[in-house]
Image (tube, rainbow, N blue to C red):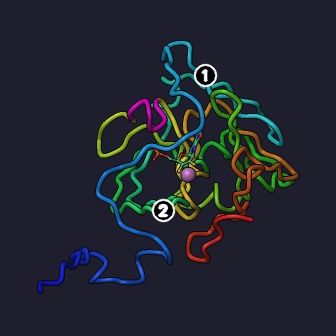
């Protein structure tokens, strides 16, 4: 009798520690969210930056495209156990947005406000990290509507639900506020390496 065995992905074979505990590699990019996918008219779209900042901002899509941008090549890890390697995102570092708005020293958390009231938050040091973006491109293409078009957050050090899609506001806060999934049982820290999935 022949045993059927799924071949181990060469990238995992080369570096077994690259896949966080309990995760399974996928090639496709699954779609996951609560509610329906919004449609936006780009010329009416605005991103509001507010809270513990010196200057509130209201950025148009055009404004955003003019800000310094960078590429982030990263792996993404969903709490539902799929991981996808080698995602090439492009966008504005959240650190740059913080600088533009003049985030105050009191700002310890960043809360993302999204379409239909969805929210999520991270401690400010994650938002200011090199690999944290406000992203509008994946693999050289504009984000697909179901993946957050026009703009989503990218916080690759956390489970992917912290990478909020359809971001409309960024709030710098002195105190944290639990987001949508976090109020519904997801672990607020969300570190995939420590398997912080649920409360
Ligand atoms: N606005 C918004 N962003 C969201 C969500 C959501 O429900 N609404 N779900 C999160 C969850 S649970 C996951 S796993 C990822 C999935 O992103 P993807 O559909 O691009 O894979 O989006 C996150 N961002
Ligand atoms: Mo998720």
Quadrant of image for the C terminus: bottom right
Residue 46 is labelled as 1
- Tell me, for residue 88, which label it has, or none: none
Task: Check the image and report above or below for 159 versus 152.
Answer: below
The image quadrant that residue 118 belongs to is top right
Magenta extent: 144-149
Extreme left residue here? 1
Q: Quick check: marks 1 and 2 in contact, CB under 8 Å?
A: no
Closer to the camera, 119 or 133?
A: 119
Q: Residue at x 56, y 19 (%)?
A: 45
Q: Earlier in the sequence, mark 1 or mark 2?
A: 1
State the image coordinates of residue 70 (x, y, percent, origin top left): 42, 49
- Percent position of residue 77, x then y: 48, 62
Q: Is residue 21 above or below residue 48?
A: below
Under circle 1, the secondary element is strand
Distance in Å between CA atoms under marks 1 and 2: 29 Å
Instruction: Name the foreground residue: 80 vs 13.
Output: 80
Q: Is residue 148 magenta?
A: yes
Is 123 one of the magenta-colored residues? Answer: no
Residue 115 found in image quarter: top right
Q: Label 2, on which residue?
A: 77
**Nearest-to-viewer mark from 1 and 2:** 2
């Amino acid at each position: 009798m022949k045993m059927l065995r799924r071949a181990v992905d060469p990238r995992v074979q080369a570096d077994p520690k690259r896949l966080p505990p309990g995760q399974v590699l996928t090639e496709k990019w699954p779609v996951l969210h609560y509610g329906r996918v919004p449609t936006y008219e780009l010329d009416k779209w605005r991103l509001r930056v507010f809270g513990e900042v010196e200057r509130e901002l209201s950025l148009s899509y055009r404004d955003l495209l003019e800000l310094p941008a960078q590429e982030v090549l990263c792996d993404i890890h969903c709490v539902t156990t799929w991981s996808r390697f080698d995602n090439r995102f492009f966008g504005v570092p959240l650190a740059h947005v913080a600088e533009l708005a003049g985030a105050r020293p009191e700002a310890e958390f960043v809360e993302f406000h999204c379409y239909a009231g969805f929210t999520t938050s991270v401690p400010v040091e994650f938002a200011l990290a090199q690999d944290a973006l406000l992203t509008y491109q994946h693999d050289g293409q504009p984000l697909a509507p179901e993946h957050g078009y026009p703009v989503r957050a990218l916080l690759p050090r956390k489970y992917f639900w912290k990478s909020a899609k359809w971001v409309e506001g960024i709030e710098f806060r002195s105190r944290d506020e639990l987001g949508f999934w976090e109020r519904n049982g997801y672990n607020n820290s969300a570190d995939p390496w420590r398997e912080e999935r649920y409360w």
